[in-house]
Amino acid sequence: MHGEEIAIALRSTVVAPRTAVELAKKLDGIRSLSHIFIPEVSQKGGFQSLEISSACLGVSKRLRIGSGVIRILEHDPDLLAARLLTLQALSDNRFVLGIGTGKPGGDPKKTIQSMLERLRATSNSFGKSVKGSDHLRMPETFIATLRRGIAKAVIGHSDGILLNFCPPEYARALIESVRRNTGRLPIVSCYLKLFYSRREDSAKRMLIQEFVNYNVNPSYHKMFELAGVADEIASASSVLSSNREKINLSEGLLRISLANPSKEELARHINRFRDAGVDLPCLYPYFQGDEDESFMMRKVEEIATLK
């Protein structure tokens, strides 16, 4: 397990690739930080997570850096294995492979099975390429999940699972359910989304908009209902559309995400997830599109020093 370590997520549509590389270099000496995840953007033609990870690995010596997550069903196993082999050889086995399915389609169970088969084929191809080598190994692997059924299905197929945008109580219930049904549990990481702006109302508006965006997804809407925050999201959305100056965030939403948190607020937030059983809290900062690079870098460096 990762003890008191934390991770950082640097999304390329929020933090430019060149800035992410510069941050990887600066953050390499922070001992409490163990991982940097580079979330893959959903839009076609966007920046590629594997390439950004490669550049970040090239300027760091200690950090484990990788995808968070790629849609593995869109990748040929042999070609992906060759890319992973190259990344591992260049980084002394520090690449981290985060994978997901993308949209589950009409039969989620079949999609999950296809994802695991693709991962197995990639791992087998990787193994054939390194046969006879005692040095190179398959990357540490995290599988993105939100539902308990998926989490249970992927046990034994990865080193960890990666949760996203959920309350600590939901994470705890999922973790306990998996442990109770399987008797074991991989490393659990979870994206903790944080919204920063020089203006308080702008940070709060970004946070609310993210909830509104995710609430359209049936799986997230169901989770928000279970967490008792679905009505709070609807209420916050109406405030957003009314364009009121003053925005108050409910306690329910603040148990999932934070806007311009103080160090003390963020430390408490991290500890709530640790207490729920999350081994590797992953701080996921968001900024406005026109935000100054120095402000973004300062904030990322600031949160990376928290435990």
Image: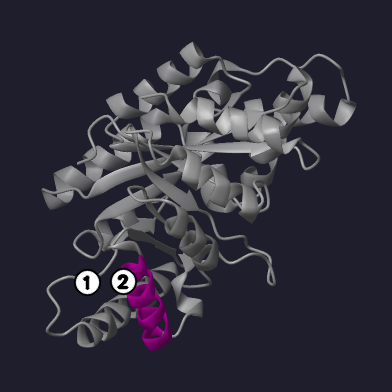
Residue extent of the magenta highlight: 77-90
Q: Secondary structure at mark 2?
A: helix
From the viewer's perspective, tell me whether residue 21 is left or right of residue 144.
right
240 versus 133 height, above or below: above
To which quarter of the image does residue 171 belong? top left
Q: How many marks?
A: 2
| Measured Cα–Cα span from mark 1 to mark 2 | 7 Å
Q: Earlier in the sequence, mark 1 or mark 2?
A: 2
Q: Main secondary structure of the magenta part?
A: helix
Q: Is residue 267 above or below residue 153?
A: above
Direction from residue 91 to residue 127 in the image, left or right: left
Instruction: Judge whether residue 51 can be spotted in this image.
Output: yes
Figure quadrant of the N terminus: top left
Name which residue lies at 49% across and 39% down.
26
Question: Magenta includes 45?
Answer: no
**Percent of width and height locating residue 88:** 32, 68
Q: Residue at x 46, y 51 (%)?
A: 37
Q: Nearer the viewer, residue 215 or 200?
A: 200
Q: How busy is the neighbourhood of tag 1: few (under 14 within 10 Å), some, or many (20 plus)?
A: some
- From the viewer's side, name the closer residue of 200 and 252: 200
Q: Amino acid at mark 1?
A: Leu
State whether residue 299 is above or below residue 140: above
Which element type, helix, strand or loop, lies under badge 1? loop
Residue identified by numbered label 1? 136
Query: To which residue does mark 2 refer?
Result: 89
Q: Quadrant of the C terminus?
A: top left
- Whether residue 228 is visible to the viewer of this picture, yes or no, is no
Task: Say what amino acid the circle numbered 2 marks.
Answer: Ala
Residue 129 in the image: above or below residue 151? below
Viewer-side residue, 23 vs 247: 23
